[in-house]
Image (cartoon, helix red, strand yellow):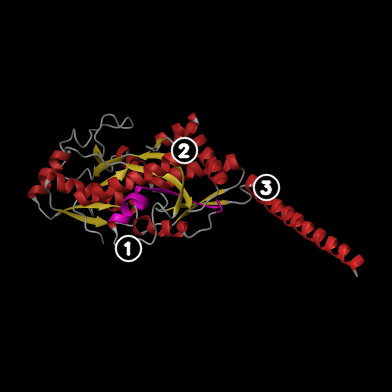
Amino acid sequence: MSLFSRPQSSTHMFGRVSGKRLLGYSLLGLALSATSALAAYPEKPISLIVPFPAGSGTDAVGRIFAESISKQLGQPVIVENKPGANATIAANYVAKAKPDGYTLFVTTNTSHSAAPWLMKNVAYDPVKDFTPIARGGNLPFLLVTNPNKPYKTLAELIAFAKANPGKVTYASGNSTGIVAGATLGVAAGLDLLHVPYKGTPQALTDLIGEQVDFMFTDFTSGMPFVTSNRLRAMAVSTAKRSTLVPDLPSMEEAGVEHFDINSWNGYFGPAGMSPEIVKTLNTAINNVVNDPDTKARLAKLGFDAFSGSPEDFSKFVQEQYVLWGKLIKDANITPQ
């Protein structure tokens, strides 16, 4: 019996070693397969979700980025508009998507800085539920009114609103418009009536039709109406003048102190995206803003394009969340 016991033991040990080797080979194969999949990204079209309607500033800018990223990565980047509810509909959609790099989000301070303070119930966490990829730049805002109105300057608008308390209306198509209008009301001691819209294009249509009195709009959406004399621009929403419209006064120059509101733009994916895919997308976005022709094309839309690392963007998003919380509280805006 002893003659058979040793070979049995030896065979048992050999089987165990072989099993370990097989497991190692399997794990190595999985790792190589995962690496190969990452190296091949993207293998199919990418969806770029826009939280505002077609024709909005974010939509126009996002389509230029999508076109360039598509050429760089060799796959279509398809823009999908999912507007409404202060950009939270689109944000919820992206937050719940697979973090595989095929669902991306181009958004602004509306969804990530302001909406969590403007709304009582937001179903996502603007920091924990997203992967920051890259910043895209800034969208300056203009204070515009209808040329048929009796006021031509901000000072005249303020005087008119004080003489007609509760009767002057301001439209908004996003959170920047909401907060800027409310901030003007508080800073100048005005009793204004807010008229919210699902998007900027609809708000501008009613402003041109004299259904509302004034609004803060992004440069991209509003400037074509200003140049065609269908709207009058009175100021930019920042503390200093914009190089895009150097002849237009800042809000401070126009008489409202400490008024400095800007809209940022950036790219996210769902939480949990692979660092390799984030790096690929971040590189593509930085290539967009560093291309002189594309940058000039974006500037014509009134978009100040620049980017940076995912880490810088992540820190910026967290800082902006705190800043916009203060802006909204100072403007006495009650969450809805």
Residue under label 1? 121
Membership of 114 in magenta stretch = yes
* Residue type beneath disc 1: Asn
Q: Residues within 10 Å of mark 3 (few under 14, many from 20)?
A: few
Q: Which residues are magenta?
A: 100-117
Q: Secondary structure at mark 3?
A: helix
Q: Nearer the viewer, residue 210 or 331?
A: 331
- State the image coordinates of residue 112 (x, y, percent, origin top left): 36, 51
* Residue type beneath disc 2: Ser
Residue 309: numbered disc: 2
- Side (left or right) of 309 relative to 144: right
Give the CA separation, mark 2 to mark 1.
31 Å
Membership of 183 in magenta stretch = no
Q: What residue appears at the point 76 percent right and 54 percent down from the top-left corner? A: 21
Q: Secondary structure at mark 2?
A: loop
- Side (left or right) of 79 relative to 168: right
